[in-house]
Structure formats: structure tokens, C-alpha cells
Image: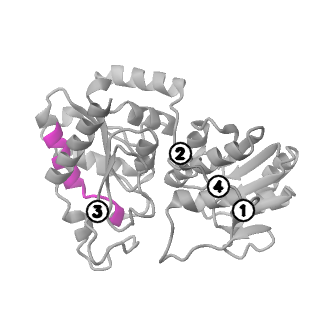
Amino acid sequence: MQSILIIAPNWIGDAVMSQPLLAQLKNQYPNSNIDVLATTWVAPIYRAYSEVHEVIEAKLEHKKLQWTLRKQLAQKIQSKNYQVCFVLPNSLKSALIPWLANIPFRIGYHGEFRYGLINLALENPSKINRPPMVEHYLALSQVLSDELKILSDLTAPKLNVSPPANESVREKLDHAGIDAKSLLVLCPGAEYGPTKRWPAEKFAQLAQALVDENSKMHIILLGSQSDHAIAQEISQRAKRPSDIHNWCGQTTLDEAIALIGSAKGVVSNDSGLMHVAAALQTPQVAIFGSSDPAHTPPLSSKAKVIWLNLPCSPCHKKECPLGHLKCLNNILPQQVFATLNAAINSSEKLT
């Protein structure tokens, strides 16, 4: 097989968890080129993968058909003569481009009335008994050959930091007077909704405890522009806001990857940046509320998960159906503080 196309998922975390599939395909077909069609939002993730030959960046928007753009992309893709396409999202829209491009084998999961658009399909697992997302994607690699075994050493995502992003981050840190050796990253956002976000006041208490412990410590708050207000609240609540830097919406995703890769440790919600930290093997604490760490865990030996496993969770709701949000409110800053120190100390002993 000479050329493979991947239709990328639309979320950063899912994009990170798709890397083992790419590694498995490269192992199966070592002489093939693997290209990825990705939205502008997740394209930097795929540029950080050594298995990817080319990233085809597309300005596709969430919940929009954009029929004309999809036809134009299909024409471009058809000229590349891909033999097979793996469609990772479950939407009908995501299957249109490889179908319009006449790619012979279009592999994915059944979903959203796309029979025919996907001509080699696996059944979607039930929401009650869902496998980890990495395994969900990896299963697609076996569609063309049932006898192939998935290599166990390829099941943890791996990211590479680009040299230009590293250089850009060094300049930003120097300009802000931040020593990379005393840098911690907090990621207070989660696109899904409030039930995935540890409260801002608790992040602020954690940040204050961290800078109180080490006067040279600097904390960078990372996320998208939509997280800026939450991060601003965190920095305003802290007693020493000069040591807490709100960079939400102020970095590219490439730069965010580089910052997380150079940090001593990361604390995040169950979010895309959580998976970035895991793929970079940065010591981290991952806070789970309404979601299930068995389905989307940070796949890293340097990651520690805090999840209270209450009778009402995981509910997978965007708003707490019981109105108390105990799954997150009952996680104390002192617990996260101790867990982060344990993760960092354990990592330093290993190195």
C-alpha cells in the first residue's frame, strides 16, 4: 500500500489518542505515506507526529456542511490517488470527502446514516461498554487484515515538539522573565462544559500553594481564548498574581505543546491538553469529574488521575443533573498539591 489518508477527529484529545493508530499503520505498511486531512484547530497535533508525511489543513467548521469546500478538497485529494482512507469521526460529513474523492477503501465505524460512504465499517460499541479511545481507533487497523496483532509498545501516544515552537517559547519565557526550570502549567479549561472543569477558586488555591512552596516558581495558565476569563479569575484570586501568568489564548497550539513539554509538571482537567501532557511524558495530575478515566485516561506512567468515583459519576452530562457538582467540588487543592509533588518527585527519581 503506497498512500493512506486519515480523516482526523475534531478535538485535540481525540487527535492525540489517534497517534497509536498511525504508528500501527506505519508498522504494517512501512513503505507507505500517511497523510492527514485535519482542521486548522488540530493540524498542529499531526505535524508533531513522525509517522505523518503531509498534513492537509482544511478550514472546516463544527456543525457546518460547507459543501463547496468539501467538493474542492475532494478534488485535491482525488489527484493524490490514495488507496485507503481511515475516517475517524463518526459524522456523515466526515465521510463525504473520501467518498467524493473515489478512494477505494473507506474505513470507519458505522454512524450517522453513512452506509455506502463508509464501505468497510465496524460496529460502534455501546456507550455503556466503551473501550478506551486509543483502542477504539486502533481496532480500525485490523479491518484490512484480521490476523495482524496490535503491538503493545505502540499503544501510548507520543508527540514531538517542533524546533520552531521551542524557539518561540524560549523567547516568550525570556521576555516574561520566566526560567523554564521553574515552570508549572495549569490548564483550567475543558471545551465540553462545567462538569469537566475543576472550579477556578480551587485552581487559585492550588496556584497559591505552589508559589508559596517555592518563591522561584512561575505558573502559566494555558488554554484557548475561551478559557481566558477562567484563567483571569484564577490569577486575580491569588495573593501573588505576578507569579501566575494567564497565557490562555496567547499561544499557538504548537507553542502550548512546547510549553507543556518543558514544564516540571502539569495540572489539568480531562481535556485535550491533558492528553498532550501525557504524550510528552510530562509529570501531571489529571482531574476527572463527569467523564470516565477508564475511557479517556492520560496514557503515561508519569500521570496521576484524581477521580472520586461517586455513585452519580460518570454521568457524561455538560451540567450537573443533581446541581451539586460534588465530583469536582469535593476534590481539595491540598490533595492535588500533594499528588502533583508526588508525580514530579517520582519522575525525578526515574531520571
Q: Along the polypeptide, which appears first: circle 4 or circle 3?
A: 4
Q: Which type of secondary structure does the marked residue at label 3 adopt? A: loop
The residue identified by callout 2 is 153
Q: How packed is label 3: few (under 14 Cα within 10 Å), some, or many (20 or more)?
A: some
Report the Cα–Cα distance between label 4 and label 2: 12 Å
Verify CB contact (< 8 Å) between mark 3 and mark 1.
no
Lateral position of residue 89 relative to residue 106, left or right: left
* Circle on res. 149: 4
Residue 298, position in %: x, y? 41, 52
**x then y, percent, for residue 292:** 39, 66
- Whether residue 46 can be seen here: yes
Return the disc, 3 or 1, that comes first in the chain's sequence. 1
Q: Is residue 5 magenta?
A: no
Q: Residue at x 70, y 51 (%)?
A: 6
Of the two numbered discs 4 and 3 in the rendering, the one whose residue sits closer to the viewer: 4
Q: CA distance from mark 4 to mark 1?
A: 8 Å
Q: CA distance from mark 3 to mark 1?
A: 36 Å
> What main secondary structure does the magenta stretch of the protein show?
helix
| Quarter of the picture holding the C terminus | top left
Q: Is residue 41 visible?
A: no
Q: Which residue is mark 3?
A: 307
Amino acid at the residue labelled 1: Asp
Mark 2 or 3, nearer chain start? 2
